[in-house]
Image (cartoon, rainbow, N blue to C red):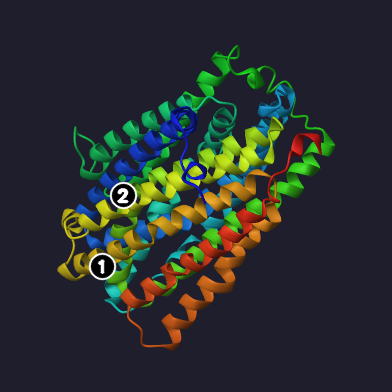
């Protein structure tokens, strides 16, 4: 393959970064503040950190389901915007709103009723029974308070995703930054009891996050409805909730596999993490530490993956040639993988220092260091599979996307983690390495699928 098929010119990267950079900034700040939140809770104690980490793992399933709902309609949003169909964008926006409200309602009920049982699944490894019981109580308290923020989270995602898909990438970034600022300030005040506020600990961290979700929704929704000259889909968006039956069925058919995929993938990851936790309570804390640094280091490849989905979707909506679409896709994937080689190296270099920020034991810190190094090694493969996922999804091949993502998760990664953790004497470090390395195989499958090129499809003319 020639180098010009892998690297673009300045105009190409300018176009890519127009979409990716605001997402990088927003996600970078979000994950940096998440890191600070994590460290703040970690200063309270390892038991509290374990409870919060487990609850966030459970909420992660809901969050990805929200992303799946908006992504299913978002495939059509990007292509309608590319073809200049504003009414089509408006219909997809309404779909996201209604689906988000439904999902938030169901999610809140499920977590309120079964939350304690979910958390207890992660507390069956080696460790003190008293610590496990305390982690359960802290985790459930955190989860219940976080439920206050599930509805604004779903609604703000409906707004932000539609704005990004129609070229307004800065506003979601500003909304995210405002939410981050609110969250960080309230965390400092409520966790530790500054400025006369009560010292709430874990409950304060949850309340701060829930309030920040409302702040983000206020910014993105407020700007959208006061700038209808720029955001045409907002004009008459609430005049009715009508969606043409044909389009509703299309979104449902294309979007349901994505929703199911996000649920199954996140549930699969939760099962894998639960399998890791059977190696001991220290593993929960170490995973929390290493995962926080991984999320911060991975903001570039996650943002480029989103940019791949948006730009490739718009190109397909405009009817650009398959050769041009394939060429642009290859260049963006190359940029994503190379960026992860750089950030993975930085992550590995920080592996021994970062765990020192936490008020925890030396054994947890040492374990976290080894997990960080493993995450750094597999990050370029994570970048490739992430970009491949968004590429295949952009053309509406949602069933294939489901098989590539969740199918692989449940047929390979989950059985491997489950079997090794329960039927062998393998320790956490080699277990984590073997399970993480499955993305090498997934990358090979993704490469073969991308070369076929049958993911290139214009849905707006279907």
Residue 149 vs 227, above or below: the answer is: below
* Residue 34 image-quadrant placement: top left
Image-based side of 268 in relation to 453, left or right: left
Find residue 102 and report its horizontal and vertical position in percent. Answer: 65, 44
Sequence-first disc among 2 and 1 = 2
Instruction: Please say whether residue 148 is visible from this viewpoint.
Output: no
Image-based side of 379 in relation to 449, left or right: left
Residue at the disc numbered 1 = 370
Give neighbour class at mark 1: few <14, some 14-19, many 20+ (Cα, 10 Å): some
Residue 451 vs 278, above or below: the answer is: above
Find residue 153 and report its horizontal and vertical position in percent. Answer: 50, 39
Indicate the secondary structure of the residue bearing disc 1.
helix
Residue 452 vs 160, above or below: the answer is: below
Residue at the disc numbered 2 = 342
* Residue 407 image-quadrant placement: bottom right
Q: What residue do we see at 66% from left, 22% from top? A: 233
Outermost residue to the top: 229
Q: What residue do we see at 57% from left, 47% from top? A: 390
The C terminus is located in which quarter? top right
């Amino acid at each position: 393959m020639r180098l010009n098929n892998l690297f673009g010119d300045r105009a190409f990267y300018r176009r890519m970064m127009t979409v990716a950079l605001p997402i990088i900034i927003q996600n970078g700040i979000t994950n940096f503040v998440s890191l600070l939140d994590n460290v703040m809770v970690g200063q309270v104690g390892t038991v509290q950190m374990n409870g919060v980490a487990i609850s966030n793992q459970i909420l992660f399933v809901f969050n990805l389901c929200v992303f799946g709902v908006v992504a299913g309609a978002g495939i059509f949003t990007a292509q309608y915007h590319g073809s200049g169909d504003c009414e089509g964008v408006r219909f997809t926006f309404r779909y996201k709103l209604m689906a988000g409200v439904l999902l938030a309602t169901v999610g809140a009920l499920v977590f309120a009723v079964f939350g304690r049982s979910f958390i207890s699944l992660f507390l069956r490894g080696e460790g003190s029974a008293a610590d496990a019981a305390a982690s359960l109580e802290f985790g459930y308290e955190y989860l219940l308070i976080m439920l206050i923020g599930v509805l604004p989270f779903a609604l703000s995602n409906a707004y932000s995703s539609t704005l990004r898909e129609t070229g307004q990438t800065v506003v979601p970034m500003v909304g995210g930054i405002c939410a981050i600022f609110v969250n960080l300030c309230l965390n400092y005040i409520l966790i530790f009891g500054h400025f006369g506020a009560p010292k709430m600990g874990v409950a304060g961290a949850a309340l701060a996050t829930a309030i920040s979700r409302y702040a983000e929704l206020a910014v993105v929704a407020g700007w959208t409805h006061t700038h209808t000259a720029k955001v045409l889909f907002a004009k008459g968006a609430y005049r009715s909730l009508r969606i043409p039956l044909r389009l509703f069925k299309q979104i449902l058919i294309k979007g349901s596999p994505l929703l199911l995929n996000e649920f199954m993938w996140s549930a699969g990851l939760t099962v894998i993490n639960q399998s890791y936790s059977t190696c001991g309570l220290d593993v929960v804390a170490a995973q929390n530490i290493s995962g926080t640094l991984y999320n911060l280091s991975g903001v570039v490849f996650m943002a480029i993956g989103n940019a791949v989905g948006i730009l490739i979707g718009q190109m397909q909506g405009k009817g650009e040639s398959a050769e041009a679409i394939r060429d642009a896709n290859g260049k963006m994937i190359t940029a994503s993988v190379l960026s992860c080689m750089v950030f993975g190296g930085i992550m590995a270099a920080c592996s021994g220092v970062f765990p020192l920020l936490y008020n925890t034991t030396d054994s947890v810190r040492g374990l976290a260091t080894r997990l960080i190094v493993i995450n750094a090694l597999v990050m370029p493969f994570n970048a490739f599979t992430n970009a491949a996922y968004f590429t295949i999804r952009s053309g509406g091949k949602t069933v294939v996307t489901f098989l590539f993502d969740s199918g692989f998760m449940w047929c390979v990664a989950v059985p491997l983690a489950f079997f090794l953790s329960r039927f062998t004497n393998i320790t956490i470090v080699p277990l984590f390495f073997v399970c993480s390395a499955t993305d090498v195989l997934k990358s090979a499958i993704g490469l073969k699928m991308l070369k076929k090129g049958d993911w290139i499809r214009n849905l707006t003319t279907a």
